[in-house]
Image: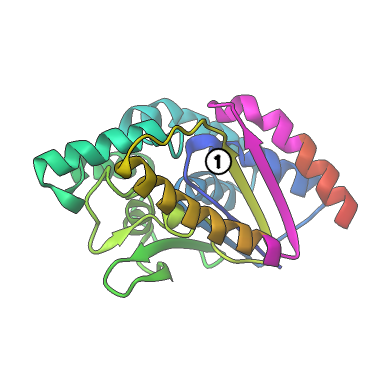
Amino acid sequence: MTLAFGGNSVLYFSLPAFFKACEEFNLKFDEIHCVGFSCIPVYYYLKTGSSNQSYVLSKNLYEDAIKTFHFANGFNFTNVIEQIRALYKASKTLAGFKSQKVLVKFVEKYFPDEKIDKKLKIHAFNLNTFNDEILQDNLREAIIKTLTLPLEFAPYNGYVSGAWVYGIPEADFLLIIQKTFDVSLNNAVDFMVYSTYARTQKIINQRINNAKYKIKISTKNSNPFNLSTKLYEISKKYIGGII
């Protein structure tokens, strides 16, 4: 069985709670697909084989992630509008409003220069071919590509995170965490951005509906470690019902 996570926010740092529930039922997966922020706890889990260690390692870089990524808390409609206007005025298009070096420094600090585990399937969107890709290069390169959030960072070697393009890779079992937010549409730019968000949301919903197993959580919580208990309880109840 294959497993996939969304990854548009650091709320996915709560995923060790899901893996803890899997451990209790001895539920294992042949492949684990991830995109964006979910790749961080997934990598640590596969590296250590422990949900507890994955939790600790993810928590260790949490504060740094909040400082590094403007959109760490996910799609924020107000912030997206502000950044689009700033980019338009500066005529920077896809150049991003933050230096790529910031992202590279973050990845090099927390991830070794090594090959990707065969079970770990890191996804990113190739702007040259307009396709979702499972990255085959080394771990650092893959993590940089999957964390290259549109608007925030310029495309890295032609790649951006798929977290805002298609939301979640396809698999037998899907888990997605979405932060709820209020929307106020006032002008053309607002409608343009929201239509893009709605398109991604439609893809997510289609993939969720097509998956045999799925867990979908909506929350107003911004801290993944405050969400962990809820995710663990929901996961334990769901997995117990399908085993």
Q: Is residue 243 magenta?
A: no
Q: Position of residue 75 (x, y in %)?
A: 44, 39
Q: Is residue 162 left or right of residue 229?
A: left
Which residue corresponds to the image point at 37% horizontal and 29% vertical from the top-left? 64
Which residue corresponds to the image point at 27% horizontal and 46% vertical from the top-left? 151
Figure quadrant of residue 234? top right
Q: Quadrant of the C terminus?
A: bottom right
Q: Which residue occupies the extreme bottom position in the image? A: 129
Q: Quadrant of the N terminus?
A: bottom right
Q: Amino acid at mark 1?
A: Tyr
Q: Is residue 145 above or below residue 57?
A: below
**Any part of residue 116 in sight:** no
Depth check: 180 or 67 in front? Answer: 180
Q: Position of residue 58 (x, y in %)?
A: 51, 35
Q: Is residue 216 magenta?
A: yes
Q: Which residue occupies the extreme left position in the image? A: 90
Q: Is residue 99 left or right of residue 110?
A: left
Label 1's element?
A: helix
**Any part of residue 66 in sight:** yes
Q: Which residues are magenta?
A: 209-232
Q: Position of residue 32 (x, y in %)?
A: 59, 60
Q: Position of residue 188 (x, y in %)?
A: 31, 44
**Location of mark 1 (residue):** 12
Which residue corresponds to the image point at 76% horizontal and 43% vertical from the top-left? 235
Depth check: 90 or 161 in front? Answer: 90
Figure quadrant of residue 3? bottom right
